[in-house]
Image (spheres, coloured by chain):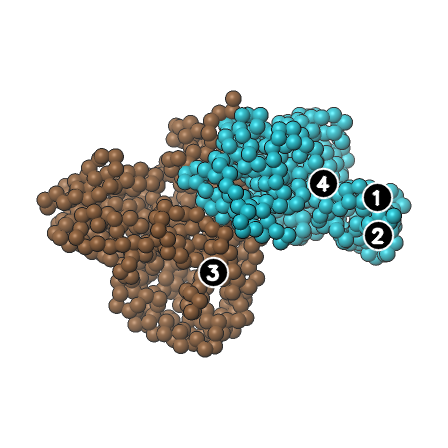
Chain colours: A cyan, B brown
Amino acid sequence: MEKNLIIIGGGPAGLAAAKSAYDAGERDILILEREDRLGGILNQCIHNGFGLHTFKEELTGPEYAARYIKEVLDRKIEYKTGTTALSIDKNKRVTCASEAEGLMIYEAKAIILACGCRERPRGAINIAGCRAAGIFSAGTAQKLINIDGYMPGKEVVILGSGDIGLIMARRMTFQGAKVKAVVELMPYSSGLNRNIVQCLNDFDIPLMFSHTVVDIKGKGRVSSVVIAAVDEKLNPIKGTEQEIKCDTLLLSVGLLPENELSRMADVNLSPVTGGAVVDDDMMTGTDGIFACGNVLHVHDLVDFVSEESEWAGARAAAYIRGEKAKGERVAIGAEGGVRYVVPQYALRDGEENLKLRMRVGNVYKNVRLCVVCDGEEVYSKKCMIVTPGEMETVSLNEKQTRALKNCKKATVCLKAVER
Amino acid sequence: MKKIVIIGAGVIGCSIARELSRYEAEIIVLERENDVACGTTKANSGVVHGGFDAKPHTKKAWYNVRGNEMFDKLSKELDFPFRRNGAYVLCFDDTKWDGLKKLYDQGVENGVKGLKVVTGDEVRKREPYVSDEVKGALWCPSSGIVSPYEMTIAYAENAAANGVKFVFEKTVDRLEKSGEKIKVVCKDGDVYEADAVVNAAGLYSDELNNSVSSTKYKIVPRKGEYMLLDKTSGYLTSTTLFQLPTAMGKGILVVPSVHGNVLLGPTAVDIEDKECRDTTYDGLAEAFDKARITVPSVTKKTVITQFTGLRAHADAGDFVVGWAGDDLPLYNLIGIESPGLTAAPALAVQAAEDVADYTALAFNKNFNPIRKGIPCFATMTENERAEIIKKNPLYGRIVCRCEVVTEGEIVDSINRPVGAKDLDGVKRRTRAGMGRCQSGFCSERVMEIIARERGIDMTEVTKSGKGSEIVVGRVE
């Protein structure tokens, strides 16, 4: 079967991409969603705080998703739920399967990867101890409570202060569980500050920085965890161990873009973001394959996922019409405290004003976020504080965009504020 | 009909059950856990050893070489994954070549075929990620890899299909002589009176024997910690990489799994607690640091899980195989540590023949040696995938995205004979939850399927047996 545009993933990224591709004139669109309903991970995020940027109001996850689902339904965009994409290749051949329709094979003109991210599991962080039940990634626990209606445990320790972990600390407290501590390896949180205030401080849940879990005890079910302070090199300090009785350990230790399909299509991936390397059309190094949302880099606000994905959708539609620039590109580097910038390349002859998204590698106070083109600072923004937990956005105006697109070397970096 | 009771459903108990099912008898396997392959069998290197490592004229050497030769036919009959990938024993020191030569001579004496001493460059030609420090190696082409629990499940399913009865969550307390017969007394008070008992109780095989026999044994659990790498690290090696033992110790392995992962380990520490399955900070660090001697480019970034296994090390050193003495109809398999997995097929044939002789069993004319595994969606061609979904639409529903496991496979794993009862059981049979997200996405779906297929409540679904319930109740 043939399809102009296949969007893999029916979460916030895929929905926004579909809507804007349609609005850009594309009519032959198919969204593939592996779950039984559209909306992605938003469906299990029943807390509020979504949509402040996009809709100027506070929505819950399902409400935010519903707005975009309505946009997709209103446009009668085709979608298939319960359908998993099994493979894609660089010729944009997509195979997928569902219980209802069996194995399906599509030849697409363009593909948008919008398949989101997954949580880092216990194994990836090498915590020693038992393998008893009661160890969950925070998102799995969230799904069990909010979708299935089951409590994962009663006495909880949370490792990692990522947003889902913070949200779950509050959620489990609401449900009568005792959250004994949130333990964070780094000297700062990777979550949003507002979540620390609203989810921990308001409930007197201790947040312990520079600590980690060094042992998990229990037969059958977790019975306690041992935590310890860590040194500057993040190694546990002997003698600082303390045992906390609990039946549950939640892990909120980072999200990883899920790029299994991307690899099949030889999509070039960034070792820093874990997602594709893209140009300012959100196109990957593989012609006609675009990426947006958490599969590209992990966002902290869904509003930015939607914005980025709408842009990807519009550009994919332009690509299908044959309007995509194929010319030269300029690399946008990340230096001086900035860990990464997306997009990693800007097309010389693109037209729109550039929007750059980035994360820093540490907590910095009183700095300027600068865009430097061939040694000349074309953009600068003062920041009281930047943290790894909050994504920064730089919107370049027309003149700044032109300067960047015409330079030989562009970088984004942090500079100290001169006094 | 004669009654034979096998105690223990690890690879030894299950392989003997299958070989004994070639005879007419009432065969019962008693297992304290809720599944087969729950002890030493599920947590080891999965290596089918060539047989150069065991001292000549030991039972270990004899059964290792014979067992190894049986794997090709057996893996086809029972449909479990096995590959002869070959192994190197790496020598990092120019002065230790005599160590390789000694292993070579020992292997030849044990009857291992195809052994060759090669240079470091020859090793790196085949395995380019092996350290430049490797000066030479012993090459053993007959070495292989197997999935130990899938092999055991295959044996158990075939045994069950041929009439063997499995009783789970049944802990044996002691054995008692009962005239010509022997009584198996269980912790819950149940008693089985058997014409012969096979002691395949692994770590507890000493206590079981000692409860009735005048010859006493002692098992010392030898703990080994492992790290498992994601399939994206599969390029590191396709062959099994041993380190030549040095004064610093035995060294550890870097070994591919039949499914394309890479395993680092095991450490070796003698401990007291037969129930200890914990990994330790120091143990994992040792496994990783020693693995890096073999493949310097290995990184912790691709580690997806860690685990601990206990080897049933007997103080005697060699396998104990045979009748317990004292005119007891008790057949012992004690101290079946490495190369026990490799030896299992040969040990099983021997044990079954001895028991059948002793109890004068007739052949089972209906014995069927063939077992078919669960059709594996992940490894199918597109046409095969299309076909199987047509036949069973549940194969169109992908539950575990990392390992591409379908609901069809999970349902099959629960409903077949000796089927899965919980998350770990499903995982061992289908690989659901075995991948890089380590069941973050699929565990809740698999729980639902288990609850539905077994007709139990979600709160009753366990990870691995009683006491490992996953959720504690409903949200109020």
Q: Which chain carries label 4?
A: A
Q: Which mark is residue B254?
A: 3
Q: In this figure, which residue is indicated by the disc labeled 1?
A: A381
Q: How much space separates mark 2 and mark 1, taking CA atoms?
A: 12 Å
Question: How many callouts does the rendering have?
Answer: 4
Image: B436 above or below A40: below
Residue B183 position in % (x across, y down): 17, 42
Q: Name the chain under label 3.
A: B
- Mark 4 or mark 2: which comes first in sequence? 2
Q: Which of marks 2 and 1 is nearer the N terminus?
A: 2
Q: Do the residues labelled 4 and 1 touch (CB within 8 Å)?
A: no
Label 2 SS: strand
Q: Identify the secondary structure beneath mark 1.
A: strand
- Mark 4 or mark 1, which has the lower sequence index? 1
Residue B32, horizontal then vertical, whole percent: 31, 41
Q: Nearer the viewer, mark 3 or mark 4?
A: 4
Q: Is residue B330 left or right of residue A84?
A: left
Q: Name the residue under label 4.
A: A390
Do the residues at pointers 4 and 1 share their chain?
Answer: yes
